[in-house]
Protein backbone atom coordinates (compact mmCIF):
# COMPACT_ATOMS: atom_id res chain seq x y z
CA UNK A 1 0.00 0.00 0.00
CA UNK A 2 1.44 3.37 -1.03
CA UNK A 3 1.50 6.18 1.50
CA UNK A 4 -0.29 9.35 0.42
CA UNK A 5 -0.13 12.78 2.04
CA UNK A 6 -1.98 15.88 0.89
CA UNK A 7 -3.09 19.07 2.58
CA UNK A 8 -2.22 22.67 3.22
CA UNK A 9 -0.60 24.86 5.82
CA UNK A 10 -2.28 28.19 6.41
CA UNK A 11 -1.50 31.35 8.31
CA UNK A 12 -4.63 33.43 8.76
CA UNK A 13 -5.03 36.62 10.68
CA UNK A 14 -6.18 40.20 10.71
CA UNK A 15 -4.36 43.13 12.25
CA UNK A 16 -6.01 46.47 12.97
CA UNK A 17 -3.67 49.40 13.53
CA UNK A 18 -5.45 52.45 15.00
CA UNK A 19 -4.46 55.99 15.83
CA UNK A 20 -7.30 57.80 17.61
CA UNK A 21 -6.95 61.55 17.00
CA UNK A 22 -8.99 64.47 18.36
CA UNK A 23 -11.49 64.70 15.51
CA UNK A 24 -11.10 61.37 13.76
CA UNK A 25 -9.50 57.96 14.04
CA UNK A 26 -7.06 56.68 11.45
CA UNK A 27 -7.08 52.94 10.82
CA UNK A 28 -5.01 50.54 8.79
CA UNK A 29 -6.32 46.99 8.54
CA UNK A 30 -4.06 44.22 7.28
CA UNK A 31 -5.62 40.85 6.42
CA UNK A 32 -3.16 37.97 6.33
CA UNK A 33 -4.12 34.91 4.32
CA UNK A 34 -1.05 32.92 3.40
CA UNK A 35 -1.50 29.34 2.37
CA UNK A 36 0.65 26.60 0.86
CA UNK A 37 -0.96 23.48 -0.58
CA UNK A 38 0.88 20.19 -0.92
CA UNK A 39 0.12 17.17 -3.07
CA UNK A 40 1.49 13.70 -2.50
CA UNK A 41 4.91 12.91 -3.97
CA UNK A 42 8.56 13.93 -3.83
CA UNK A 43 8.79 16.92 -6.19
CA UNK A 44 8.21 20.63 -5.80
CA UNK A 45 5.13 21.37 -3.65
CA UNK A 46 4.88 17.66 -2.80
CA UNK A 47 5.27 15.73 0.46
CA UNK A 48 4.88 12.11 1.52
CA UNK A 49 5.93 11.98 5.18
CA UNK A 50 4.46 13.53 8.34
CA UNK A 51 5.62 13.42 11.94
CA UNK A 52 3.91 15.30 14.73
CA UNK A 53 4.21 15.14 18.49
CA UNK A 54 3.61 17.03 21.72
CA UNK A 55 6.75 16.79 23.82
CA UNK A 56 7.91 17.82 27.28
CA UNK A 57 11.41 19.05 28.04
CA UNK A 58 12.64 19.42 31.61
CA UNK A 59 14.36 22.62 32.67
CA UNK A 60 17.67 23.12 30.82
CA UNK A 61 17.22 19.78 29.00
CA UNK A 62 18.17 19.21 25.36
CA UNK A 63 16.91 16.63 22.90
CA UNK A 64 17.92 15.77 19.37
CA UNK A 65 15.18 14.88 16.92
CA UNK A 66 16.79 12.38 14.54
CA UNK A 67 15.22 13.03 11.13
CA UNK A 68 16.75 9.96 9.46
CA UNK A 69 14.98 6.83 10.65
CA UNK A 70 14.32 7.21 14.38
CA UNK A 71 11.06 9.22 14.53
CA UNK A 72 7.95 7.02 14.28
CA UNK A 73 4.85 8.26 12.43
CA UNK A 74 1.21 7.81 13.40
CA UNK A 75 1.17 4.37 11.73
CA UNK A 76 4.09 3.11 13.85
CA UNK A 77 6.57 3.27 10.97
CA UNK A 78 10.03 4.81 11.37
CA UNK A 79 10.50 7.81 9.08
CA UNK A 80 13.72 8.59 7.25
CA UNK A 81 13.22 12.07 5.83
CA UNK A 82 15.23 12.95 2.72
CA UNK A 83 13.93 16.53 2.77
CA UNK A 84 12.01 18.68 5.21
CA UNK A 85 9.47 20.90 3.46
CA UNK A 86 7.80 22.36 6.59
CA UNK A 87 8.74 22.65 10.27
CA UNK A 88 6.23 23.97 12.77
CA UNK A 89 6.96 24.50 16.45
CA UNK A 90 4.77 25.93 19.21
CA UNK A 91 6.01 26.74 22.70
CA UNK A 92 3.01 26.04 24.94
CA UNK A 93 4.48 27.80 27.98
CA UNK A 94 2.82 31.01 29.14
CA UNK A 95 5.54 31.95 31.63
CA UNK A 96 7.90 34.81 30.77
CA UNK A 97 11.45 33.62 30.10
CA UNK A 98 10.51 30.00 29.35
CA UNK A 99 12.21 29.88 25.95
CA UNK A 100 12.84 27.01 23.57
CA UNK A 101 16.00 27.09 21.49
CA UNK A 102 15.80 25.33 18.13
CA UNK A 103 18.83 24.73 15.91
CA UNK A 104 21.41 22.32 14.60
CA UNK A 105 23.13 19.82 16.85
CA UNK A 106 26.83 20.17 17.63
CA UNK A 107 27.56 16.95 15.73
CA UNK A 108 25.56 15.69 12.75
CA UNK A 109 23.36 18.78 12.93
CA UNK A 110 20.47 19.44 10.58
CA UNK A 111 21.68 22.96 9.86
CA UNK A 112 21.02 23.79 6.22
CA UNK A 113 17.96 25.86 7.23
CA UNK A 114 20.17 28.08 9.41
CA UNK A 115 23.61 29.45 8.65
CA UNK A 116 25.68 27.11 10.86
CA UNK A 117 25.58 24.80 13.88
CA UNK A 118 25.95 27.66 16.36
CA UNK A 119 22.79 29.41 15.14
CA UNK A 120 19.56 28.93 17.05
CA UNK A 121 16.05 30.29 16.91
CA UNK A 122 14.70 31.41 20.29
CA UNK A 123 10.99 30.62 20.57
CA UNK A 124 9.46 32.49 23.48
CA UNK A 125 6.40 31.54 25.53
CA UNK A 126 3.31 31.19 23.36
CA UNK A 127 5.49 31.54 20.28
CA UNK A 128 5.02 29.78 16.96
CA UNK A 129 7.77 29.06 14.44
CA UNK A 130 6.67 28.13 10.93
CA UNK A 131 9.29 27.42 8.27
CA UNK A 132 7.95 26.30 4.91
CA UNK A 133 10.14 25.56 1.88
CA UNK A 134 7.80 23.82 -0.56
CA UNK A 135 9.94 23.79 -3.69
CA UNK A 136 13.43 22.68 -2.67
CA UNK A 137 12.98 21.82 1.01
CA UNK A 138 15.98 21.23 3.26
CA UNK A 139 18.02 18.08 2.69
CA UNK A 140 18.41 15.60 5.53
CA UNK A 141 21.70 13.71 5.35
CA UNK A 142 21.70 10.51 7.41
CA UNK A 143 24.54 10.25 9.95
CA UNK A 144 26.03 13.66 9.06
CA UNK A 145 23.17 16.17 8.87
CA UNK A 146 20.07 14.75 10.50
CA UNK A 147 19.85 15.93 14.13
CA UNK A 148 17.54 18.84 14.96
CA UNK A 149 18.22 20.07 18.49
CA UNK A 150 15.58 21.48 20.83
CA UNK A 151 16.67 22.95 24.16
CA UNK A 152 14.60 24.20 27.08
CA UNK A 153 16.41 27.34 28.25
CA UNK A 154 13.86 27.97 31.00
CA UNK A 155 13.63 27.21 34.69
CA UNK A 156 10.59 24.90 34.43
CA UNK A 157 9.49 22.07 32.15
CA UNK A 158 8.12 23.20 28.80
CA UNK A 159 5.53 21.42 26.69
CA UNK A 160 5.93 22.04 22.99
CA UNK A 161 4.30 20.89 19.76
CA UNK A 162 6.28 19.96 16.68
CA UNK A 163 5.16 19.07 13.15
CA UNK A 164 7.61 17.96 10.46
CA UNK A 165 6.46 17.48 6.87
CA UNK A 166 8.67 16.31 4.03
CA UNK A 167 9.79 13.61 1.65
CA UNK A 168 11.32 10.19 2.14
Image: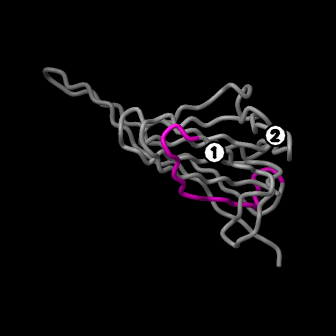
Mark 2 or 1, nearer chain start: 1
Measure how far apart labels 2 and 1 are at the Cα level. Answer: 15 Å
Task: Check the picture and name the quadrant holding the N terminus.
Answer: bottom right
Question: Callout 2: helix, strand or loop?
Answer: loop
User: Which quarter of the picture shows residue 61?
Assistant: top right
User: Which quarter of the picture shows residue 119?
Assistant: top right
Residue drawn 50% across and 34% down?
153
Residue drawn 81% across and 45% down?
140
Look at the image and say whether residue 121 sits in the magenta stretch: no
Q: Position of residue 141 (x, y in %)?
A: 85, 44
Residue drawn 74% across and 26% down?
116
Q: Which residue is mark 2?
A: 145
Q: Which residue is most to the top?
A: 22
| Number of on-image labels | 2
Q: Nearer the viewer, residue 49 or 160?
A: 160
Q: Which residue is mark 1?
A: 63
Whether residue 75 is situated above or below residue 81 in the rendered picture: below
Q: Which residues are magenta?
A: 43-61
Amino acid sequence: MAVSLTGSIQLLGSLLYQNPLDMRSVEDQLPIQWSKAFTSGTGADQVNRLWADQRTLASLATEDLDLAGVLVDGFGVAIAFAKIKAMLFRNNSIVAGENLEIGGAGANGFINWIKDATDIVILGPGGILALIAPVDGYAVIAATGDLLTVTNAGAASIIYDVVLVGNA
